[in-house]
Every structure is written in C-alpha cells, then in structure tokens.
Image (cartoon, rainbow, N blue to C red):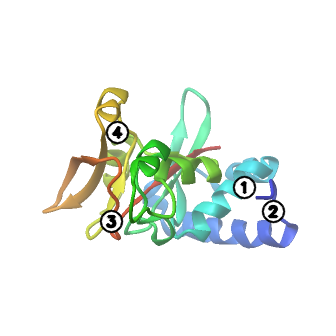
Amino acid sequence: MKKSLSATEQTALLNILKTRFENNMKRHQKLVWEPIQQKIEANPAKARSLQQMELSGGEPDVIGLDPVSNSYLFVDCATESPKGRRSLCFDQAALDSRKENKPADSAIETAKQMGVELLTEEQYRQLQSLGEFDLKTSSWIQTPANIRQLGGALFCDRRYNHVFTYHNGANSYYAARGFRAILHL
C-alpha cells in the first residue's frame, strides 16, 4: 500500500473531512479546522490512514484533542460499525486457529495495515457520549491480555439506550461485527 496520497486524493479527503467537521460541531466544540488540516497535510502517512478509514465506511471525525500528546483524535463516527471492516475475527492468532470458514482477515491485522488502532472501552464510551452508535452492529475493542490469553476478546454495542461491553471467542466473527478505529494526529 502506498505511503502517501496523490494531490487529488488529498484534496478530496480534506473536503470530506472538513464538511463532516463543520456539520458535527457538537463532537469538537472548542476546536477549529485550520490547524487540523495543517496537521493532516504535514503527515502523509496519517492522511493515508484517514483515507483508509473513510474508504472502509468509518466516516472519521475529530472527537477531541489529547492534552498529553497534543494530538487530534480521529475516530470512526459512522452510525454503524464500518461496513468495510466487518466479518473479522479479533486477531491473527484467532484467525490462525480457525480450521474452517475462515474470515478474510482479523480486526487487529486490518487496523495495523491501516495505521490505526481499535478503540479502548473508555474511548468507545466517550464516542457514545457524542451520539448513538452501533444500534444494529457491534465493534471489537482492545482486549486486556489476560482475557485474550484465555481465548476471549471484547466488543461493545448500544442497545436499550445503554452501552454494553461483552465477550466472545476471539476466533468468532459475525456479519454485524466490525471495529471502530482511532487515529492520533
């Protein structure tokens, strides 16, 4: 996969992100677009990651500024788990353990290829405070090592106006389960 976008691709991506930013100010009330655009333009690899988030249906948007790293936090804000990232088991070990009916890939490996990370449970809950997401789908989240070592993995969704965290075998996959990504820029 190429490391940077063409000028045409970058312009198209910036237009999409700027429009989404302006149409969803409740997600980032104290932020302005221009410094965000400058950071995107100065980081070709991160721009490529944002494009991958967009192309796979994530609808990335800024949800805040990390005060420690001074980085903008782009998160998938599609209403449902991104269509282009569903039907994935949790990680490579889970994928390797399947003998039959293997999915195309795993959430962790796909995220690595995109240059992003899965949300933590805390980040997922923060996103849910900004709107209602995953009302019909669910999303894998980062899983503590002790749970993963026992063969499990965590996912979240929103049902009955409540955010739930569940567990499943890491090698499971479902048409309605994908993952939401975060990119620090």
Q: CA distance from mark 3 to mark 1?
A: 29 Å
Residue under the point 45% across and 51% down: 95
- Is 21 above or below relative to 39? below
User: Dot 1 corresponds to which residue?
Assistant: 47
Q: Which residue is mark 3?
A: 174
Q: CA distance from mark 1 to mark 4?
A: 25 Å
Residue flagged by tag 2: what amino acid is it?
Answer: Leu
| C-beta proximity under 8 Å, tags 2 and 4 | no
Report the front residue among 61 and 1: 1
Residue 15 drawn at (x, y percent)? 69, 71
Q: Which residue is mark 2?
A: 5
Whole-angstrom CA distance, mark 2 to mark 3, is: 32 Å
Residue at 54% across, 59% down? 61
Q: Amino acid at mark 4?
A: Glu
How far, Cα to Cα, is label 2 from label 4?
Answer: 31 Å
Label 3 to label 4: alpha-carbon separation: 23 Å
- Residue 10 at x, y = what percent? 78, 65
Which percent across, then down, holds residue 66?
Answer: 54, 35
SS category of the residue bearing label 3? loop
**Residue 33, quarter of the rendered image:** bottom right
Q: Which residue is mark 4?
A: 122
Q: Is residue 185 left or right of residue 57?
A: right
Of label 3 and label 4, which has the lower sequence position?
4
Give yes or no for contact between labels 1 and 2 (Cβ–Cβ under 8 Å).
Answer: yes
